[in-house]
Amino acid sequence: MATSAPTPILEIPPHTTPQLHHNLKHDNSVLALVVGNDSIYAGTQNGEIVVWQLGTFQKVHHIQAHKRSVMCLFLSDDGSLLFSSASDPIVNVWCPRSMNRLYEIYSTNDSFGDIFSVSYSSQHETVYYGAQNTSIQWVSLKDPSRRVSHDSPNHPDRRNHRFFDSRAVGGTSTPRPTDERYELIPRSHTVLETDKRANMLFAHFGYVYCMLVTKGSTAYTEPDEDVLISGGGDGTIKVWKLGGREIGPDGYEKGIEEIMVLGEEDAVSVMSLATDGSFLYSGRLGGKIELWDLDTKQKLRSIKAHKGDVMALQMGWGYLWSASRAGTACKHNTVHYGEYQRDSAENVSQKYQCLTQWKAHDGKILSSAVTTYDGNQMYITGASDNNVAIWMLKQGPATEQPSQEEEEDMMLTSLREFVSFKTISSRPEYAEDCRRGASFLRGLFKKLGADVDMLSNEDTLHHPVVLAKFSGKLEPAEKRKRILFYGHYDVVPADAKKSRWNNDPFQLTGTNGYLYGRGVSDNKGPIMAALYAVTDLVQAKSLDSDIVFLIEGQEESGSCGFKETVRKYKDRIGHIDYILLANSYWINDDTPCLTYGLRGVMHATVCVESRGPDLHSGVDGSYMVNEPLSDLMMLLTKLKGPRNRVMLPGFYDGILPLTAEEEARYDDIISVLMEQGNDNVSAETLKANLMARWREPNLTHHKVKVSGPDGSLISSHANAKISVRLVPGQEVEEVTKSLTSFLEKEFSNLESDNKLSVQIDNQAEPWLGDPSNYIFRTLEEALVQAWAPFSDEASNGASNGASNGTSNGTSNGTSNGTSNGVGTAKKVNMNGISINGTRVRKPLYIREGGSIPAIRFLEKEFSAPAAHLPCGQSSDSAHLDNERLRVVNLMKSREIFTYVFKKL
């Protein structure tokens, strides 16, 4: 596979190896690539076409296009038609947006073989395809005489083949192969049958491996005239004049007329072609690239570029890009390339050098493409290792080393660096990494225009809290609302050597539309989305309110010291009107949500110890010895009764009753989950399960630890880690006192001479927001607009397993992401609201069983309501191996924050 740290083979300073921006994984070799305005199209060995969206790299289509390997893809000049050919005798024409199959084209000639290449002339509205039998054939898309019915007897699936279907007298023919995948190929709208006369037999004396259509590349045609260029297995390159319909003396159409033959002496197969004005580059077997002048028919240069066959060539931004079967890719300098033409004083003899070469894939590179999307220059490679790699390049033709800011969206650049800090707050050995992560945030906030302070409580050894303030433009300042965004820069541990991470967890890796890395979802990605939403508003001069970021460094270890630090610097933070955080996930992978409730938690260590040392159970053990572990087990069993009921006195007394509004929210959630496939669980059971996890308290025994080594010992010390999850209506201090007194009372009943201690490790109050208040209503509006189309009607429109709907992406045009991601959209029965006169679905309002210590504390401390926006999907694997965040979710979160910060 492509690696995020590609191995440089050659670098001529100041040129450097491109950075792997994203990796798209498939389960088959990628034989063909083209790129449109906003999508990447890949043809695979299994006959599929897979479409990913640029910007978000979300898979939007995955269709069975052919019965056998897709050999070539070609996109028309205006991007309205996608052509595919394969090792079956069919050429297909697709709508690139919907991936509807518009035309199915076939030849009536037998022994046609694989169709290695296909091209299209918009000027003549004609498709040209080159085949294994050395011919080039063509058909006009607008010729009504070539249209036939779907059940034509001449179709390759139905006509009798003179060789393969032949049989001796009394014998039988070999049955044709069948595969259930064949039934998945979409039915075409129109079938075109190539006229037997539209055929250039022996166009080459070898397979026609590659073709392209270009305009104005040679003095032998008019400047605005399309010409066809083909490369063959016989080593020749031919240039063809297009357009004749006359029938020649040989009985064939003069649809193409040979006007130039190059490389007749070479006899080394031509596998790839690229043009640059009148210059033609040909990639050949053996790693050689040749440069030809189409005006003079001269070979200008022969370049030994690779150890393997040159399978793909592209011209982009004044450079020639080549890729080979050896898995290597190269960047070469050139001359005479329009706006990228170099200074004439440069030494032309130094041109056509390899400036960088790197190991791009672990397999054979079979295809490539170049594009500029949202200001970013991308070189894209597809290979037999089942990967499509997107390499981010420097802006413009200058030869200075590219900076991260020029290579990709600043938010992704910042996130990439943010993830690289091993900010693991629970391990002392990473204390310096945590400080460096905080310093990175301080520098980034300051760079983007914020007033920044590092807050710390001098009485404790805790990581600093980063305070950053962006001032709004509304005057006077007293009229501005002040919105506090809370987040955390620390993460849980991730050990790539002892776990199942596919990549370095502290090196951001893009794969199949997702960003992988520790903390990318919890909570570094959402922090970056909120930060760059503010910068978008500042740059647009649309930020009226003050935005205050409060980013702590110990949330994953109980937010130790956070309360004390906030109280110490409360005056510096200032008054707050609203509190916003983004530290959780949707209930599934498809439905945007808002979180309005969290359980609280109290962690405790219960310890029983004797006054003496560890003892031998055989020598010293008897009924007269009170064993600490036995005492501890007796205590733990008292904490819970039948059906896991917590036995603390008055434990359930303050729990808030279920209201009709809350139950309706659960019903909305259940309707979504049941429609998305929970057939093995009843709706009633699923609803009860959610309520038990979200709005009911619980007590959990985590682990027990004893003194001494393993063996027949009576341990002198035994402790247990327990936690109590609390819900609104329960006060954490009251439950703490109740737990301590209950354990002390039960321990006294044991009449043991051991000693009991109860240590409270950390606490977090439960939180319940008000979904009807202004901040939640604003978030709801933002979600609906960002994820539109979000209506019942839109959710039904799926094509080839993906929603057809698209949105405009982020506010600054970074993303053109799909609305509902990958997978068939489900119709959701939810109450609607009206946006611009359109009835649209509301997001799901959910609660969660986990805890965030800071949220209820901040509400109380600043007397301000809080709201919680989940940014990620349920499959993000936060705290687990291969934590990820979908690119489109990151971009949409930025858009949502932009809306909310502006409106609040």
Image (cartoon, grey):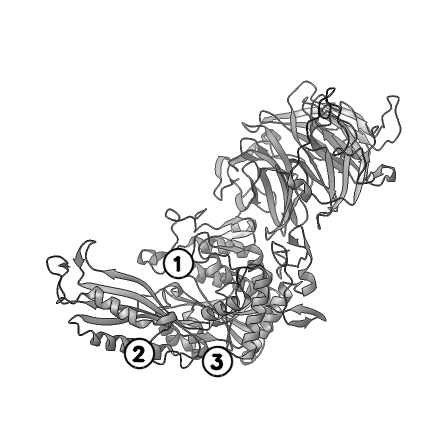
- Give the structural element (helix, strand or loop) at label 1: loop
Is there a contact, CB below 8 Å, between mark 1 and mark 3? no
99 drawn magenta? no
Please rate how many residues cluster around mark 2, counting C-alpha atoms within 10 Å: few if below 14, some from 14 to 19, many from 20: few
Q: CA distance from mark 1 to mark 2?
A: 30 Å
Residue bearing the label numbered 1: 492
State left or right for residue 397 relative to residue 81. left
Whichever of callouts 1 and 3 sits on the residue coming sooner in the sequence is 1
Q: Element under label 3?
A: loop
Q: Which residue is mark 2?
A: 737
Q: As displayed, is residue 886 above or below residue 203? A: below
Element carrying mark 2? helix
Depth check, mark 2 against mark 3: the one in front is 3
Q: Label 1 sits on what residue type?
A: Val
Q: Is residue 33 visible?
A: no
Residue 438 horizontal/vertical position (percent): 41, 61
Give coordinates of residue 164: x percent, y percent.
71, 25
| Residue linked to disc 3 | 657
Q: Residue furthest top?
A: 265
Ranked by sequence position, the earlier of labels 1 and 2 is 1
Disc 1 to disc 3, C-alpha distance = 35 Å
- Per the model, the C-alpha gap separating discs 2 and 3 is 24 Å
Q: x%, y% of residue 416?
A: 49, 53
Q: Nearer the viewer, mark 1 or mark 2?
A: 2
In the rendered structure, which segment of residues is drawn in magenta?
A: 577-583
Q: What residue lies at 51% left-to-right and 57% top-to-bottom?
A: 875
Q: Earlier in the sequence, mark 2 or mark 3?
A: 3
Q: Amino acid at mark 2?
A: Lys
Q: Is residue 76 left or right of residue 255?
A: left
Q: Observer-nearest residue: 841 or 628? A: 628
Which residue is rendered at x = 26% and y = 72% of the image? 758
